[in-house]
C-alpha cells in the first residue's frame, strides 16, 4: 500500500518519487493499492495509477477507519508519509517504510522496530532510490508468500 496522502502539504513526498518507487515495486511483481481521504489525494493517486501499466495499481475504496484497518492488515508492505494511515499500519504490525519530509521520526515509536524503517525528516527528503532499497529490504525480511500487495 502506498499511503501517499497527508493532512498537511509539507508532509507530502514528491509525486515523481512516488512514481519511481511504484515502478520499483511493480518491477518486483507487487500490486499497488493507493488509499485516499480527500479529493486532492484521490487526484494524486489517480495520476500515479495512470502513470503505471494498466491493472498494476488500484485506488482503494474510500471507507471508514475499520475499512482502512482491514486494507492495511492485508498489505505485505506499507509505504507512507507521516499520516494516520502510516501510524495505523504500525499499530497493526505491518512492515512499514515511513517517509518523513518536514517532520521527523522522533515521535514515531512503533511497538516492533524490526518491522519499520524511517527515512528523511526535518527538511531532508529521502530519494526514491533510497526508499526503493529500504522497501525491498523490508519485503525480503518479512516475505509472506500469501500476500503480494503494497
Image (cartoon, rainbow, N blue to C red):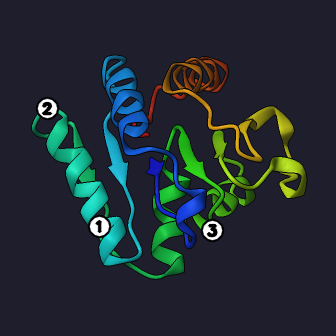
- Residue identifier under label 1: 42
Q: Residue 121's quadrant in the figure?
A: top right
- Residue identifier under label 2: 53
Residue 40 appearing in the image: yes
Q: Residue 54 in the image: x percent, y percent?
A: 9, 38
- Residue at the location (56% across, 49% down)? 80
Which of the two marks, 2 or 1, is nearer to us in this view? 1
Check disc 3 and report its element: helix, strand or loop: helix
Q: Residues within 10 Å of mark 3 (few under 14, many from 20)?
A: some
Q: Is residue 15 left or right of residue 53?
A: right
Query: Which one is in front, 29 or 25?
Result: 25
Check disc 2 and report its element: helix, strand or loop: loop
Q: Residue 90 in the image: x percent, y percent?
A: 72, 53
Mark 2 to mark 1 CA distance (whole Å):
18 Å
Q: Is residue 150 left or right of residue 27?
A: right
Q: Earlier in the sequence, mark 3 or mark 1?
A: 1
Mark 3 to mark 1 CA distance (whole Å):
16 Å
- Residue identifier under label 3: 84
Amino acid at each position: 500500500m502506498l499511503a501517499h496522502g497527508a493532512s498537511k502539504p509539507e508532509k507530502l513526498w514528491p509525486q515523481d518519487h512516488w512514481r519511481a518507487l511504484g515502478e520499483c515495486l511493480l518491477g518486483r511483481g507487487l500490486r499497488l493499492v493507493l488509499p485516499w481521504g480527500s479529493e486532492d489525494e484521490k487526484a494524486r493517486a489517480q495520476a500515479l495509477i495512470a502513470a503505471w501499466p494498466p491493472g498494476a495499481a488500484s485506488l482503494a475504496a474510500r471507507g471508514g477507519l475499520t475499512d482502512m484497518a482491514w486494507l492495511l492488515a492485508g498489505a505485505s508492505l506499507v509505504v507512507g508519509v507521516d499520516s494516520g494511515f502510516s501510524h495505523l499500519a504500525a499499530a497493526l504490525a505491518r512492515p512499514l517504510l515511513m517517509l518523513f519530509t518536514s517532520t521527523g521520526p522522533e515521535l514515531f515509536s512503533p511497538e516492533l522496530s524490526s518491522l519499520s524503517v524511517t527515512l528523511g525528516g526535518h527538511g531532508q527528503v529521502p530519494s526514491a532510490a533510497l526508499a526503493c532499497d529500504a522497501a525491498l529490504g523490508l519485503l525480503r525480511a518479512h516475505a509472506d508468500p500469501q500476500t503480494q500487495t503494497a
